Amino acid sequence: MELRESSRRELAASNFPRRKFAPKKIRLDGKRISFRDVAKFARPRKTIEFLCDKTGKDRSTVKRWLSGESRVPDTASNAVWADIFARYG
């Protein structure tokens, strides 16, 4: 069975290795934008309460995320980006 051209492209693209961890850094003018800045942009008031509600974690864990002491899970970053896109399209 001969593969069509579009099938060949899909097979070639699937041979690339997947990146296990995507970088979480967003850069603007060469400076890193922190998760805290993005979360404060999404919810300037009650940022901690918003993240606690969306992720089901306690306040101390959320404070560690906002301070940069620990890695931010995907559920928290997805909640922040979903809130931004829901408000600003």
Image (tube, helix red, strand yellow):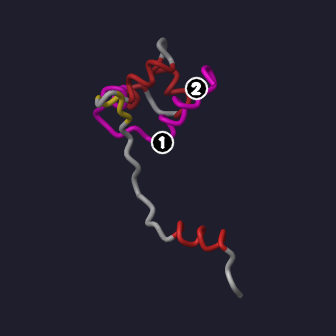
Kind of residue at disc 1: Asp
Quadrant location of the C terminus? Answer: top right
Expressed as whole percent of the image width and height from the top left, the position of residue 62 reads 41, 29
Residue highlighted by disc 2: 83
Q: Few, some or many C-alpha atoms within 10 Å of disc 2 (few <14, some 14-19, many ≥20)?
A: some
- Assign the magenta stretch its main secondary structure: helix
Q: Is residue 85 magenta?
A: yes
Residue at 39 percent of width and 22 percent of height: 37
Where disc 1 sits, the SS reads helix
Name the image quarter holding residue 58: top left
- Could you say where residue 9 lies in the image, as x and y percent from the top left? 59, 69
Q: Which residues are magenta?
A: 63-89
Which residue is the extreme one toward the bottom?
A: 1
Q: In which quadrant will I find the N terminus?
A: bottom right
Q: Is residue 21 above or below residue 50?
A: below
Q: Where does the image place residue 83, in percent across and percent down from the top left? A: 58, 26
58, above or below 4, in the image: above
Task: Choose the circle earlier in sequence order: 1 or 2.
Answer: 1
Q: CA distance from mark 1 to mark 2?
A: 14 Å
Work out whether residue 87 or residue 29 is closer to the camera in this orientation and state it: 29
Task: Find residue 74 and name its label.
Answer: 1
Q: Residue at x 62, y 20 (%)?
A: 87
Q: Residue at x 69, y 85 (%)?
A: 2
Amino acid type at mark 2: Asp
Residue 52, numbered circle: none
- In the rendered structure, the answer to whether residue 70 lies left or right of residue 84 reads left
